[in-house]
Image (cartoon, grey):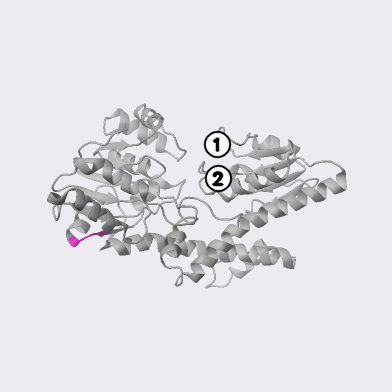
Amino acid sequence: MKSLFLGLGYIGLPTAATLAGKGHHVVGVDINPDVVQTINKGLIHIIEPDLDLLVKDVVKNGFLRASTKPEESDTFVVVVPTPFKGNHEPDTSFIEAATRSVLPLLKEGNLFIIESTSPVGTTEKVANLIFSERPELNDKLFIAYCPERVLPGNILHELVNNDRVIGGINEESTNKAVEFYAKFVEGNLHKTNAKTAEMCKLTENSSRDVQIAFANELSLICSKAGIDVWELIKLANKHPRVNILQPGSGVGGHCIAVDPYFITSDYPLESRLISTAREINNYKAFWCAEKVCSSMLEYKLQHGREPKVAIMGLAFKPNIDDLRESPAKYIAQKIMQRFNNDEIMIVEPNVKEHKVFKLTNYQTAYETADIVVFLVAHNQFKTLKPKADTLIIDFCGVFNN
């Protein structure tokens, strides 16, 4: 049995490597030749614990190889990005392009799976595309949707141990996809239809977005009321049926910050709570940037000079290198646009270099800064000790948890 993965990013590569680690032959396809070359050397282009060791092993043993061109296979898995357009409408063009790239290669009995986050109805549309171009395959191809639900930083464990929701365009497709995931998933495999599986993915991340929005809104209220939001949440969570999440500088990543728009775009009148939560979490990043800028102006008025500022963290969550939709990156950009200040130091310990930001060592930045702004609660930052002579603006609870 041979499997072809279309997309070797943060989900595609770990999934392909995990399946290969179980002794199955896997080919990963990516349009970036540098990514393909890197993987074929047994190396990786992303940061994820233990992934480097797994990729090195499966490439060496011949179970995983990468290519820029798709080839015939038994199973095709689409794991490409699904960004949204300027008006927050989902852009499924990558899914369509990936599907078209393998149209000539599909044959009777193949299994075609979409893992990419998709608007409801996408799997059926892809099936219609395939059968319109290859009508001889109608009712002879298995097509299903199975969303990923892993946490960056713990992907390899969760790929194997988390439950999966699998929905085919018919019962036969669902069962065929269940057989495929049973090869490497030890969690329960829950059968449903394609539309429900698509909505399940969107629902999971929209639910989390709403819960985070509540915490972020509390932080805005507490700031105005002069209340320590961290202490408040800790005390409120002593209630046996209350579990408020921790506030932050916003919401980022290619799931929680994006998936709710897949619902609000198609169901604008029915998704008022989901839409408001998105507005709150987007506003929190803007609010953080404004608070930092105000503090910098106050410092200049009091001391007669520009402050040395350490912006601590660019990733969208702790201990990863993923900057997609990162509120921290947005905040850093806003601050630098407002102040042409050479004394602003950008810190991201999980990234070696960046095309836009000149990165500074976190210890150096912390020791020399007049104002320290914690945007991401990386483990390295938690080893630092509070300084009495420095203004600490902690949006993510580095010194409060």
- Residue 285 at what x, y percent from top left? 62, 55
Q: Residues within 10 Å of mark 1 (few under 14, many from 20)?
A: some
Residue placed most toward the observer, 361 or 340: 340
Residue placed most toward the observer, 65 or 276: 276
On screen, residue 199 versus residue 167, left or right, reads right
- Residue 357 at what x, y percent from top left? 62, 36
Find residue 19 and report its image quarter. Answer: top left
Q: Residues within 10 Å of mark 2 (few under 14, many from 20)?
A: many
Q: Which residue is disc 2 drawn over?
A: 315
On screen, residue 290 versus residue 66, left or right, reads right
Looking at the image, which residue is at 17% across and 51% down?
141
Give the magenta range.
Answer: 167-171
Q: Which residue is disc 1 drawn over?
A: 351
Disc 2 to disc 1, C-alpha distance: 9 Å
Magenta residue check for 151 = no
Does the image show residue 281? yes
- Mark 2 vs mark 1: which is more N-terminal? 2
Instruction: Look at the picture and state if 115 lies above or below 219.
Output: above
Residue type, numbered disc 2: Ala
